[in-house]
Image: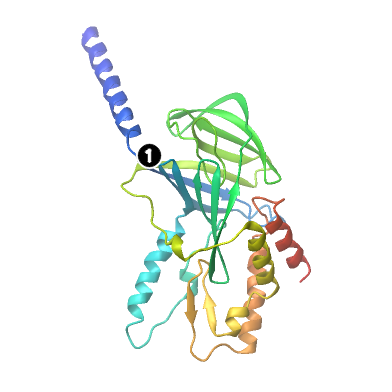
């Protein structure tokens, strides 16, 4: 009887190993991360949760990081497009979900392409990032994966990461990577941001984004454009156009009144102020944004 149990146990282990090997041989993966964050640095008791997706192609070593809200908003835009064919419709702008991290970030090797929108216009610029990790000895388990730890200073914050060799991909959420395994847990030591891996799946194709509409610029140009937008965030609205958080434009017949424009300007500054706790708090974008907001 004992031998039979041992035999079953060995067969079970071999089955699990075979499944694991088959899983890793897949060329494309999708990793789901939950981000817990404090969006407003002056209100540490108010927390938010977002879900982000990291797609990875093992054959080309390309990865794609984006908010799950992009998928929801894309479905909503298709619905609105069909409604535009009828004589009238009501658009509730609050139906468009917003995320704390609005950029779409693609990575190949240590080159990151940051895809962003400014007042409805699409821009992309490159950053070369080398993550200089300090490997530590702590071990934890995240989901069913055994993980090792590492520390890094990035974006004006000190971070701790846990990564697993069971998923031997040197990637992670946002702009973090270059560890000998997938990052499964990541947080800054002040506990403002915490990424946790919550799901893994194989996929047929990476999510398709129309990157051809993005204008290629350098980071300096992007910062200047963003600063100009912050100084007059309702420039498009003055021309009768309203823009959602993901850059979708709606032209409103008759335009907007001065009071509507002024109220929207106040709302934009209020919304930005509520999200003033930048993940990269020492970046030029963050410093310019907080400087302009503090002057209002």
Q: Is residue 173 left or right of residue 133?
A: left
Query: Which quarter of the figure is the N terminus placed in?
Result: top left
Q: Position of residue 127 (x, y in %)?
A: 60, 49
Q: Nearer the viewer, residue 126 or 6?
A: 126
Write down the quadrant of residue 218 in the picture: bottom right
The structure residue drawn at horizontal position 33% and vertical position 29%, both measured from the top left corner, is: 20
Q: Which residue lies furthest to the bottom in this view?
A: 254
Image height of 52 relative to 199, above or below:
below
Query: Which quarter of the figure is the C terminus placed in?
Result: bottom right
Q: Position of residue 163 (x, y in %)?
A: 52, 32
Image height of 69 relative to 195, above or below:
below
Q: Which of 296 and 144 is in front in this view?
A: 296
**How are the colours assigned in the image?**
rainbow
The structure residue drawn at horizontal position 62% and vertical position 25%, both measured from the top left corner, is: 136
Q: In this view, does 19 lie to the left or right of 230?
A: left
| Marker count (numbered) | 1
Q: Where is residue 174 in the image (x, y as percent from the top left)?
A: 55, 47
The residue indicated by pointer 1 is: 59
Q: Which residue lies furthest to the right in this view?
A: 295
Q: Position of residue 125 (x, y in %)?
A: 57, 56
Write down the quadrant of residue 156 in the picture: top right
- SS class of the residue under badge 1? loop
Image height of 97 relative to 112, above or below:
below
Q: Which of 279 and 114 is in front in this view?
A: 114
The structure residue drawn at horizontal position 58% and vertical position 81%, both measured from the top left corner, is: 237
The structure residue drawn at horizontal position 55% and vertical position 48%, both measured from the top left corner, is: 112
At label 1, counting other C-alpha atoms closer than 10 Å, the crowd grade (few under 14, some 14-19, many 20 or more) is few
């Amino acid at each position: 009887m004992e031998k039979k149990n041992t035999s079953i146990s060995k067969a079970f282990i071999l089955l699990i190993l075979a499944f694991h090997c088959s899983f890793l041989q897949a060329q494309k993966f999708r990793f789901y991360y939950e981000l817990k964050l404090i969006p407003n640095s002056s209100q540490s008791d108010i927390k938010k949760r977002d879900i982000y997706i990291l797609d990875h192609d093992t054959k080309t070593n390309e990865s794609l990081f984006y908010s799950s809200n992009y998928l929801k908003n894309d479905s909503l835009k298709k619905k609105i497009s069909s409604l535009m064919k009828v004589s009238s419709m009501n658009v509730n702008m609050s139906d468009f979900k917003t995320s704390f991290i609005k950029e779409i970030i693609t990575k190949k090797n240590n080159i990151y392409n940051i895809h962003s929108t400014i007042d409805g216009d699409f821009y992309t610029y490159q950053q070369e990032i080398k993550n200089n990790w300090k490997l530590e000895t702590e071990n934890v388990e995240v989901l069913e994966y055994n993980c090792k730890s590492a520390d890094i200073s990035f974006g004006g914050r000190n971070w701790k990461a846990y990564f697993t060799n069971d998923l031997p991909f040197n990637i992670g959420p946002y702009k973090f990577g270059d560890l000998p395994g997938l990052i499964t847990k990541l947080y800054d030591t002040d506990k403002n941001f915490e990424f946790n891996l919550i799901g893994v799946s194989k996929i047929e194709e990476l999510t398709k984004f129309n990157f051809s509409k993005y204008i290629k610029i350098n980071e300096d140009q992007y910062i200047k454009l963003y600063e100009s937008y912050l100084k007059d965030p309702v420039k498009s609205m003055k021309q009768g156009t309203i823009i959602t958080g993901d850059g979708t434009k709606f032209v409103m017949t008759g335009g907007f009144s001065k009071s509507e424009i002024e109220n929207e300007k106040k709302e934009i500054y209020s919304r930005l102020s509520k999200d003033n706790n930048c993940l990269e708090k020492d970046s030029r974008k963050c410093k310019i944004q907080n400087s302009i907001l503090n002057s209002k």
